[in-house]
Amino acid sequence: MASAAAASAAAAALVTAAPAAAGGRHCPRCGGRTGPLPAVCGACGYQAFLNPRPTGSAIILDGDRFLAILRARPPRAGWWDLPGGFCDGFEHPADAAVREAREELGVEIELGEFAGMYIGTYEFQDEPLPILDCFWVARITAGEITLDPSEGTEYTWLPLTDPPEMAFPTMDVALRNPLVRASSSRLAS
């Protein structure tokens, strides 16, 4: 799969660049000087790592279309996005996907098949952070879409057969997943 190879190449570039960009110059426990992450503090022995942050996202389908939100804030403001976001604390990514749909769209969703997990990048405070994007096929079960203006400026249903480039490359890969397209076919029939 060329798209999986491209995602792996992007992830490899991130792993190479991120530790230098993410710093890790001081120990979060004692304040001692350290090097780039991963690092071990010479003063107290604390180990710090640059691990991916998990996310949960929903590919909400209606027949052969999926719901997209035009991002209102950086990074990638003005790009089409899928409903989803970072997990809170020890929240499971599936629970985060359901919560984010409620917060961003004002609807309840039911998750279907797991559509994939991909390593990506998220720019935050001028640092490229590794993320672990988890996607589920979903459908709206209750409520009318009421977009949160802090999350998106508009929403639309886009064709799965020819989606635009999305805000994050992991979304492009997830939307091309044959499982997602098969789920779309089952919902349309």
Image (spheres, rainbow, N blue to C red):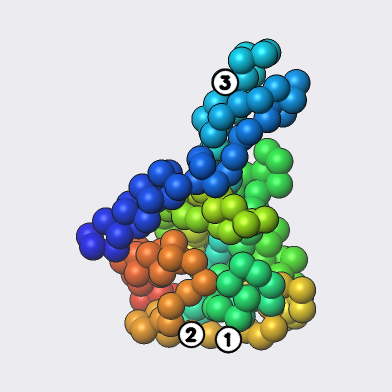
Q: Is residue 92 left or right of residue 16?
A: right
Secondary structure under badge 3? strand
Residue 91 visible from this viewpoint: yes
Amino acid carrying label 2: it is Leu
Evaluate whether residue 55 shows in this view.
Answer: no
The residue under label 3 is 40
Q: Which residue is mark 2?
A: 158
Q: Quadrant of the N terminus?
A: bottom left
Mark 3 packing: few (<14 Cα in 10 Å), some, or many (20+)? Answer: some
Percent across and percent down for residue 123 are 58, 58
Decide which of tag 3 and tag 1 comes sooner along the chain. 3
Q: Residue flagged by tag 1: what amino acid is it?
A: Thr
Under circle 1, the secondary element is strand
Q: Eyeballing the image, is 171 above or below 185?
A: above
CA gap between label 3 and label 1 equals 48 Å
* Label 2, label 3: how far apart the Cα atoms are: 47 Å
Residue topped by disc 1: 156
Q: Where, by quadrant of the figure, is residue 154 drawn?
A: bottom right
